[in-house]
Amino acid sequence: MIARAVGAVLAIVTLAGARPAELDSQYVLKRYSEAVQALTVPKVAVYAYTVSQVGPSNIEQYHRIYRSGVSVRDETLAVDGIALHRKIVKFSHREDPYTVVRFSPRADTYEMLFLGTVKDAHHIDYVYEATPLSRPSGAWVDRITIDGMRFLPRVVHFHSNGLGVHGTGQIEFSGFGKYWMPIAAQAMASIKGKPARERIVWSDYRFPENLPPSTFLQPAPLPHATLPP
């Protein structure tokens, strides 16, 4: 009985320390392509983010975003670490620039070269070098880490190049229920020869079925006070 118990313990320890099975790199790319095509983007989302910029302009802000399709309510709640007594609210209509689809290189536009694997908690992620098939302009991806469980981009490293601006950066994604959302991004750039850095951290994701229409309505201006005759 003692020997059997010892054997069972050793088996559990061996399994716990075993390295997860590594998948074929081409199979991972196939699953990646399927996962990106099947990806569901939330139509309605509420979340917070902090943005820090150092360079030509220094910024430290905390925001809360309400998004329904392209309708956006952006509330600035704190500046330079100090909570605002009266939040600053802006309304706009725009696509989300940080969706995972925008940062996912496709087989028809990139060549992917397997570089190796990295351990991620209890599974393996897969790292690839990404090379654009045509001369890139604006921004392009040069490396991607694919999550070994959901086969979606975990980390995407990119370059940017514009008029007087050259930089590199990376953005990280993670799962929130059925959605795959950004959690952190950082970039370093040279703007007209001067260094600049930016970091964004997303948090507090919620995905309600809908938001009240009043969420995206500009408040009515207060009436002007008039003196009696």
Image (tube, grey):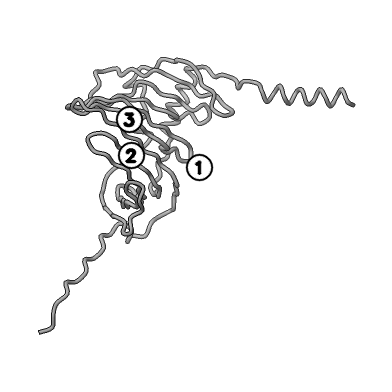
Q: Amino acid at mark 1?
A: Gly
Task: Tell me the residue that label 1 is attached to.
Answer: 177
Residue lying furthest bottom in this view? 229
Residues under labels 2 and 3: Cα distance? 11 Å
**Which labelled disc corresponds to residue 187?**
3
Reading the image, the residue beneath label 2 is 52
Whether 173 is drawn above or below 63: the answer is: above
- At a point 21% along the width and 29% down the height, the residue shown is 191
SS class of the residue under badge 1?
A: loop
How packed mark 3 is, by other alpha carbons closer than 10 Å (few <14, some 14-19, many 20 or more), is some
The count of marks equals 3
Of the two numbered discs 1 and 2 on the same chain, state the one appearing first in sequence.
2
- Residue 34 spot, x, y in % from top left: 44, 29
Q: Quadrant of residue 88?
A: bottom left
- Tag in front: 2 or 3: 2
Circle nearer the N terminus (1, 3): 1
Disc 1 versus disc 2: distance between alpha carbons? 28 Å
Q: Amino acid at mark 3?
A: Ala
Camera-side residue: 193 or 15? 193
Front residue (pair 196, 31): 196
